[in-house]
Structure formats: C-alpha cells, structure tokens
Image (cartoon, rainbow, N blue to C red):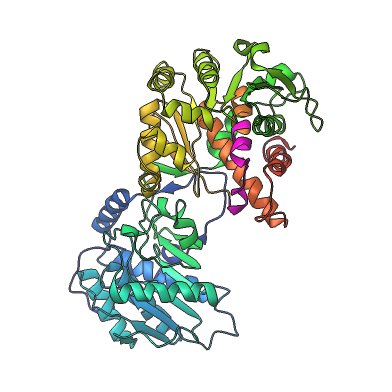
Amino acid sequence: MTSSKSSSQSPSQSFLQSPSKASTKSHYFTLKDDALALLTLRELRTLEARAAGALPPHTLMARAGAAAAQFLLESDQHSPARQALPVWIAAGPGNNGGDALVMAAELHKAGVEVQVCMPLEVKPDDARWALDTARAAGVRIVAEPPASLQGYSWVVDGLFGIGATRPLEGLFADLAARLSRRSREDGGVLALDVASGLDSDTGCAVGGGPAVRATHTITFIGAKPGHFTAQGRDLTGKLMIATLDVAPPAQPSIVLNAPLLFGPHLPPRDYATNKGTFGTLAVIGGDTGMCGAPVLAARMALYGGAGKVNVAFLGAGAPPYDPPHPELMLHHVDDLALDQMDALAIGCGMGASERAKAVLSNVLALDAPKLLDADALNLVSGDARLAAAVAARGAKGDPCILTPHPLEAARLLSADVKAVQADRVAAARQLAARFASVAVLKGSGTVIASPDGRVAINPTGNAALATGGTGDVLGGLIGALLAQRLPPFEAALAGVYLHGLAAQILTDEGEGPAGLTAGELAPKVRSLLNRRFYAG
C-alpha cells in the first residue's frame, strides 16, 4: 500500500490514535447487483497519488493498517477460545510491510499480543514511519521466523503487495510455503492487499514462482482483477474490501460482472406476449456420434427462456425427437430454414469435416446474431477465410460471440495455453479486437471482452463446472438470450453469470462440486432467472 511522502511527524502524532470508522471499516465481498470496479495497478497508482496529494502525510498507510487490525479484532477467527493466542505478522521490506507494521501497532494498543517477523528492514519512507510507530508502541519485532506457525490465532501475510515484479525467492519463498500450509491445515491466514506472489492484474503467480494461499484477504482502496481470475480466486480466499475513503475511478477499465449490467436488457414478460416474442433459436452441430452436445445446449435454451428452440444436426443417426423435452424441434441441418431464425448457436459437436466448414461458412453469411463455440472455433482458427468472415461481421456492427476455453483461445490467437493463461484479460481483449467479436474466455474468473473496449470478469462459478457438457450448456443459454434480443455483450454477461451462479447454488445444496452433471444446471438457471428478474 503506497501512502504519501514522508514527513517529520513523530510516531506520537500518528493517525493511529483516532482513525475514523469510515476510513478503517472493511466489508466482505458478496455478489451484488451493481458492478464493482476492479482496479489495475496503473489505476491504483493514480488514485494513490491523487489521495496522497490531498491528505496529511501517511494517511493511507495509517488507514490500511488500522482497517486490517479492525477486521481481525472483529473476525470470527478471533473468538473467545483463541483471543489469548498471539498474532504473528510477516512484514516485507516495502510498503506492504509498512501496512503490516501499522496493523501490529494497532493490535498491540488493543491488548493483543503481536509478534512481527521482518527479515529485511523496510525501506520506503512511509514504511520507515510505520516501523518507528510500531517500535514506539512497543511491538516486538524480530528477523527470524518461529519454528512453527501453530499456536497463533492469526498469521498475517504482509510480505509483498501489489506491483511485485519478481518471483518470491529464498526466505520469502519459504515463508510463502509455510503460510500456505498453515492456510490448509489450521486456517486464519490473512493477506494484506493481495496474497504475496500474486500478480494483482492477472491473477497469476508472479514469474511462475510461489505465492501465498490465504484464507482471507483484506484489500485496500478497491478490489483488483487478480482477485477474481486465474489462480487469484484460490489464493485470495474470502475477500474484504477497505476503501480507505478513496473513491474509485469514474470509468474503470475492468468491472466485475453483475446483474445491473445485463438485467435491464432482459425482455419483459407481459401478459400480451407469445412464443414469438422471445425468439427462435437454432442450435447447429451434432455430427454423427456427437448428437448429445447440441441437445444439451438446446435444453438449456428452453430453460433460458427462448420462445422456440430448434436443433440442426449435421450427421446421421440423430434422434427424431428428445423424449425428456419433446418441445425441442429436431431436424437435419438441410431441412431447417436457418435464415428464419432469430439467433444461431453453432459448434457443439459439429466436428471438423469439410461439410462442417461449409455449414459454418453459410451460417456466417446470415444476418441473425450468432454464438460460435467448440468445433466452430477450431474451424475458424484453422481457416483464414472463416476468420475473416467472423471479423467482417463485427466490422459491420454485427459482432459474433466467441466462447473459447483456453486451448481454443490459444488456437485462435496462434499462441499457446500458457501465454493465454498468463494474462487472461489481455488474451480476451486480443480475441475481441482480432475478430471484432464479443470474447468469452472461459475458466476460473471468465473474462468477457467487447470489441468496443468493455471488459468484465465474472465472479460466479466453481469446480462443479469442471465436467463435460457445461460449455455446451453455456452456449445454449447465451444463444437463448440472443434469441430474446439481448445485445451480444449483455447476452454473454447474463449467460456466464447465471451459469456460474447455478453451479454455486447446486453446490451449496449438496449437488456439487463433485458429480454435478451439465444437464442439472438448466432447471437451476430457470429458477434464478425467474426469482431474480420476473418475480413479483
């Protein structure tokens, strides 16, 4: 946490003496209707510099440390049974260590026994002020870590915060490993701002090195993209946000997906509506032996509110109807007037044959909104003419929606999976720009990027989605929303959010994460859609 420039103010004049509640209060992150700004390192530095210029010296660091102490004192982990136990804090050599030292002084003043391990003395001016403050308060500071991290109510990771550029090495790598073991075995590991070793912009471990796995993180000023994508969700644990009374930017470059972004675009369900009001979707795919994928997608489209849903099979041996859902209309692709559809979802199980390539080429020439998934994406990545056709549609103001997983994204970008996963936001932006399409880069913290520059990271979903068919189901849901005439970006936001939330709720009900099947998501999505947007 960067604070203001140093001054001659003495520790006895510290802002710790009376931190305002508004400045130190933190709140748990919860799924809300409104979109949360996710602050990049560049945006944070701008906000910090602006606040530092308007506030007395050391204010931001004082507020950050006090907020962390207040959270710990009010937490469940600091229960009566554990209150007599000391708190152990690891302080790094930079401003994150300064936040940790302020926190230690606050806890000491509150009567909590605190032990600070500072292997290297802090260097920045603000952190030096924090060190003087902690020493003046009587905090015990040592250079060597204890033999064991057992016997503490909390252990605190104040080693390195945002902006780390090198992987953790030596003693710091060892401390990260010990903190992570404590997290798994005994809990009560609090990271300050971001878990040490975690890139706050990408959610990846810096330089591929070790990183702390925390059970809780208290982050300052605002949440970061890295808290919600790639490894970040696992390393962050439960997230608290302490704004330190610093307002977010008016137009953040990345936001967290939320109902406020897509809810207003859902169609009203008036009495005087009919099946035509909610659109007709065709799910195109299913080469011989792969009919299940488009059927899964089409079933979800029914539950997602489309008025009519067709399945257009490419191969032989397709079923004449779907016994669980005879509402679905099943055809061979040659027997369905695709130009009469309100939306098209293409790719599920369609294969890579010349016939599949020809169907995709024909579909791209149609005017209906389109979602491309699975085999359609692989065909586009291997054929320059198809790729150009996709980009041409976007250039004319009719962007497709592309829903790749990381391997499919790598093929589309002529890259490898490691490069895609190293910066998922950048990869999604590249996809959106290259294909003039809405890109949905699936994975932990799915990234949705629009060719007009809008980017959102999705906060819903869990390991229950790590099973076959869930991608087909997502494609069917987004296709249904396109058929209901949602704009492409908002259709993608809504589909990803509801798809992930359904998995979370089913997990809470004991149906996941292990063994949840893709088909089980559809009824739960229907319930969420109706209870949240159509109840009343």
Against 51, residue 346 (above or below) is above
Side of 6 relative to 355 (left or right): left
Q: As rendered, which of 341 and 158 lies closer to the eye? A: 341
Q: Is residue 250 above or below residue 174?
A: above
Residue 123 x, y percent position in the rendering: 20, 72
Would you identify the image quadrant in which residue 306 lies? top right
Q: Quadrant of residue 161?
A: bottom left
Query: Residue 279, image x and y in percent?
Result: 66, 20
Q: Is residue 178 left or right of residue 522?
A: left
The answer to whether residue 156 is visible is: no
Any magenta on residue 466? yes
Q: Range of the magenta residues?
A: 462-476
x and y percent of residue 304 in the render?
A: 68, 32
* Camera-side residue of 2 and 472: 472
Q: Is residue 331 left or right of residue 250?
A: right
Quarter occupied by the N terminus: bottom left
Horizontal relation, residue 254 to residue 516: left or right: left
Quarter of the rendering containing residue 410: top left
Q: Position of residue 280 (x, y in %)?
A: 67, 19
Q: Nearer the viewer, residue 12 or 142?
A: 142
